[in-house]
Amino acid sequence: MSDCKVVKFGGSSLADAGQFRKVADIILSDPERKYVVASAPGKRFKEDIKVTDMLYACYEKAAKGEDFEKDFSAIEKRYNDIISELGLELSLEKDFKRIKDSFEHMAGRDYAASRGEFLNSKVLAAFLKFDFIDPAGYIKFKENGTFDLDTTIMLLRPRLAESEHAVIPGFYGSMPNDTIRTFSRGGSDVTGSIVARAVDAKIYENWTDVSGFLICDPRIVDDPAPITTITYQELRELSYMGAGVLHEDAIFPVRTAGIPINIRNTNKPEDMGTMIVASSDEASRYVITGIAGKKGLSVINIEKDMMNSELGFGRNVLRALEKNNVSFEHMPSGIDTMSVIVATDALKPVQQSVLDEITFRVHPDHLYVEDDLALIAVVGRGMRKNRGTAGRIFSALAHARINVKMIDQGSSELNIIIGVSEEDFEAAVRAIYEIFVLTQDQ
Ligand code: ASP
């Protein structure tokens, strides 16, 4: 493990000159922050448009042969405003010209979107007086479009070693034929993780506009407590909740190398944020680490006498779903019953065909669908050491007069999943939060 830190700044952290100054202060306050991954300028205010979205819209016009001059000027202005307010002697005119030409020559949607991070990183590199490294030559995708970690590390590692300090644009790399390819939206998080892996960083700091994860959704519970430390595995279990803070694919490049990720807030650098680690012996403050959930689920209930002795029963039910392209979330079962939980949106268009297929394959005694189910995942490495967690959850729910429709505890004892009616969802999350966090703090 080296002694350097890789830092990634999201779009809102680099949306204007004021934000650039905060970012520079953060980077320059710690000499170990050597490699910086930058996003494209994000929103400066609620109704603002992210540069990435402006680029997509602009390219769409170009692809239709429409005039995109005005739209492109608005993009140029975003960068020129930052450059002039920072008092930099940098001109992007040649880049603007080249990008416009490429738009006219149909360089592709991914190329268009990638220019947001490309240009922003040039500005940030000039401001910090760091090297600029274009990931097009180093971050590689395979022919089938999936990311190629091995080739990337082989190419990127020696290049980074040549630079004492560098800014690397996030979000893109290139295909074997050198055309630009982007990750999915929010993909600069993935680039940050790749760079951290390539230099074997001691930490990957992901700077954004929130101070890390909260125990539960602040739209359900007022001012929930922050999560100080979470393991990669817990985060996966809570993946319904992490949405929007960290790209899901940002975990795997660092996870195998044991590099922790620290989510930090550019606007509140004094907050320590959330640490995402491989494993933690740190006794968590609460038995649970987080509560997350989602609505919009349906249960397919299948009942048949002697189901347990019928060979291949489960496989036949799942084949019926597979044939209709529906994936399942959970599958709690009893001796003569089986319930398959699926997303309502995915089931509805093919529901009759799924039910017909199940009937044909397993001849159930009863088969029916219930809608309006919500699932809540209560996750925590602390559960293994504490007895009575499930008991506390269910007494809290009973106390709040909430009917529990389904229970599923993973064998890792890291999570308990509870199914409730959609209308009880918020009240259930509040009741669980209260019993594990509020009463503990009193
Ligand atoms: N700028 C890209 C997006 O808006 C990538 C990123 O910010 O991570 O999705």
Image: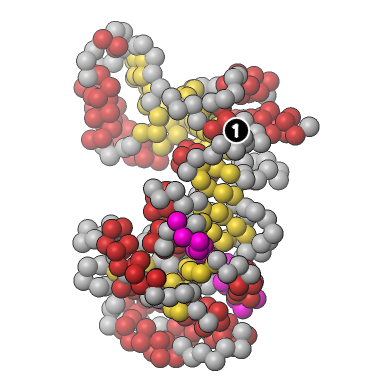
Q: Is residue 144 above or below residue 424?
A: below
Q: Is residue 411 above or below residue 8?
A: above
Coordinates of residue 403 in the picture (x, y in percent): 58, 21
Q: Nearer the viewer, residue 4 or 212?
A: 4
Coordinates of residue 176 in the picture (x, y in percent): 22, 68
At horizontal 40% and vertical 29% (from top left) the residue drawn is 330
Coordinates of residue 222 in the picture (x, y in percent): 71, 43
Identity of the amino acid at label 1?
A: Ile
Q: Quadrant of the C terminus?
A: top right
Q: Is 41 left, or right, of 365 in this rendering?
A: right
Q: Nearer the viewer, residue 12 or 275?
A: 275
Q: Which residue in the rendered view is the most extreme toward the top?
A: 306
Tell me if residue 422 can be seen: no
At horizontal 47% and vertical 74% (from top left) the residue drawn is 164
Q: Secondary structure at mark 1?
A: loop
Q: Is residue 10 magenta?
A: yes
Q: Is 253 left, or right, of 38 in this rendering?
A: left
Q: Is residue 88 above or below residue 332?
A: below
- Determine which residue is flagged by label 1: 288
Task: Magenta stretch: give its range.
Answer: 1-19
Q: Nearer the viewer, residue 281 or 169?
A: 281
Q: Is residue 352 above or below residue 62?
A: above
At horizontal 36% and vertical 40% (from top left) the residue drawn is 346
Tell me if residue 126 can be seen: yes
Binning the other alpha carbons within 10 Å of mark 1 as few (below 14), some (14 to 19) or many (20 upward) gives many
- Number of labels in the image equals 1
At horizontal 33% and vertical 81% (from top left) the residue drawn is 103
